[in-house]
Amino acid sequence: MELVREAIGSHVAWPEELVIRKHPSKNKKKKKCPIVKSLFDKVELHPFVPKRCKLLYKHAKTIIEETNESISTVLDDKVFGVQKELYILIENVTNLLEMKWIGQRVIAAYMT
């Protein structure tokens, strides 16, 4: 391997002097964003949402819904034959996490 992109999906020994470690200060409390926390606390979880996905679900039901934005990802040309940007909408995220029918966008994003 000569380039970092050639190491994707593998394990590589890395010189310790090139690793930057961030140690949280013991005296400082973590700063929480009170607005986001209050929004997240108001979201009622659907009973089928997996525990590991509850933050993504809350993010979709608050931030994505409020901003009307989408999650974008790039489809690799090695997977689909062409490089393309894929936009995942709030409906795609909530349907997936609520165990409802999902569309081709979610399946394509999973495949990438």
Image (cartoon, grey):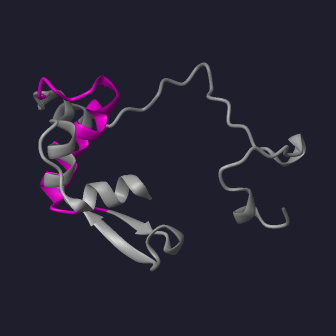
The residue positioned 37% from the left and 74% from the top of the image is 85
Where 66 sits versus 82, above or below? above
For residue 29, side relative to residue 45 (left or right) = right
Residue 49 position within the rendered picture, expressed as x and y whole percent measured from the top left: 20, 29
For residue 70, side relative to residue 75 (left or right) = left
User: Which region shows up in magenta?
Assistant: 46-71
For residue 84, side relative to residue 93 (left or right) = right
**Magenta run includes residue 55:** yes
Residue 18 position within the rendered picture, expressed as x and y whole percent measured from the top left: 84, 49
Please tell me in which quadrant of the rendered image residue 28 appears: top right
The residue positioned 33% from the left and 60% from the top of the image is 108
Most distant residue in the top direction: 26
The residue positioned 15% from the left and 36% from the top of the image is 98
Which residue is at the front of the view, 41 or 6? 6
Which residue is at the front of the view, 24 or 20? 20
- Please state, as top left, top right, bottom left or bottom right, where the C terminus lies in the image: bottom left
